[in-house]
Structure formats: C-alpha cells, structure tokens
Amino acid sequence: MRNALKLLIITCLLVFIASALPAADYYWVGGNGNWSDITHWRTTSGGNSQHNVVPSGADNVIFDANSFTGAGQTVTLDAPNVYCRDMNWTGATGTPRLVGTAMQTINISGSLILIAAMQFNHLGDVTFTGNEGGLTINAAGFRFRKNLNFNGGSMSAWTLASGIAIDSVLQCT
C-alpha cells in the first residue's frame, strides 16, 4: 500500500511538472517541405537537433533567416489541421510561401505574425483559440481567403497590428 501511494504521488508530480513546462519553439529549416515532415523542425534557429513530433497548439513555430536556402521556397500544409501557439515569420528571407488548400485549417492558440516579404497562399480557414490577453495578429496586408474564426474565452484579446481582409466569414464565439 505504501509503495502504491508513493507511486501515485510521483506520478502526480510528474504530470504537474510536465503541464507547467513552457511551449517548445519549433524552427523551420531546410527550405521547401511539408509541415508534417519533422526533419524540417529544429529546436534552435539553424540548429541540428530536431523535434520528434510536429508542432502542437502549445508550441511556437518560427520561420527566420535560417529557414530557407533559396528564393521562393514553400512550406506546404499537408494535413487537414495544423496547430501552433504562435506563428512568426519575422526575419524570414527569400520571399517564402505558406501554401494550404481550402480543406485545411490553421489553428493558432496565440499570435500570428506574417511579413510583407512572403506569400501567404493558404486557402482554408484560420482559427484563433487563445484564452489570454496580449496576443497579436499582423496579417501584413494578406487576405484570409476562407473563414477567420475567433474561438477564445472570456480573457481573449488580440491586438491587430495591421488591417485584416477576409473573403468569407468572420466568426467570433
């Protein structure tokens, strides 16, 4: 009985510690590729250590000066749903492209920072699910081609750092 209690306490502590860990940073490297290809996701900018899984809604995805090896390279969304906390393109060079079909949804639980020196060719929904204040959306002049959804809680607050254009429906729940 004592060993079972010790095991229960240790398990609870491990779960608590794991839930308190901050979001992981996922840096894109290697130029062209599919979102689900984990060989493109690294733990540091331009680094060698890669992640074992694709980003989740708790993870920050970063596209920077070390992400692309040439001009016009493409990150292709290849799953019905992709997730991240923050998506940040600040510092990305070579006019990179983000491409997704009308059947795919980008789910962002934090901020979205696009840059003018890129192509945002995502044709599907973009859904924001943050439940805190201090979040930012910078669309850098790009249009959201399908639905733009805000599914936040009572504490949700996004600051618009640029204008937003939507070709379909704006939904706030």
Image (spheres, rainbow, N blue to C red):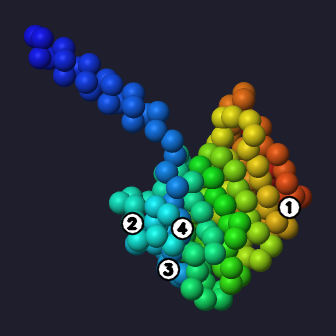
Residue 172 located left or right of residue 72: right
Q: In the rendered structure, which disc, 3 or 2, sits on the residue that comes first in sequence?
A: 3
Between label 1 and label 2, give the one nearer the viewer. Answer: 2
Asked whether 46 or 58 is in front, the reply is 46
- Residue named by callout 1: 165
The quarter of the displayed image where residue 19 is located: top left
Q: Amino acid at mark 4?
A: Ser
Residue 45, labelled with which disc?
Answer: 4
Q: Is 138 placed above or below 123 here?
A: above
Q: In the rendered structure, which disc, 1 or 2, sits on the residue that comes first in sequence?
A: 2
What secondary structure is marked by label 2? loop
What secondary structure is marked by label 1? strand
Residue 106 appears in view:
yes
- x and y, in percent, of residue 140 in the image: 82, 66
Between label 4 and label 1, give the one nearer the viewer. Answer: 4
The residue depicted at 40 percent of the width and 65 percent of the height is 50
Crowd class of label 3 (few under 14; some 14 to 19; many from 20; radius 10 Å)? some
Residue 103, labelled with which disc?
Answer: none
Q: State the separation of the CA atoms marked 1 and 2.
A: 38 Å
Asked whether 62 or 143 is in front, the reply is 62
Does the residue at mark 1 contact the one at mark 2 (Cβ under 8 Å)? Answer: no
- Residue named by callout 3: 30
Between label 3 and label 2, give the one nearer the viewer. Answer: 2
- Of all residues, the one furthest to the bottom in this rendering is 70
- x and y, in percent, of residue 57 in the image: 53, 48
- Residue named by callout 2: 49
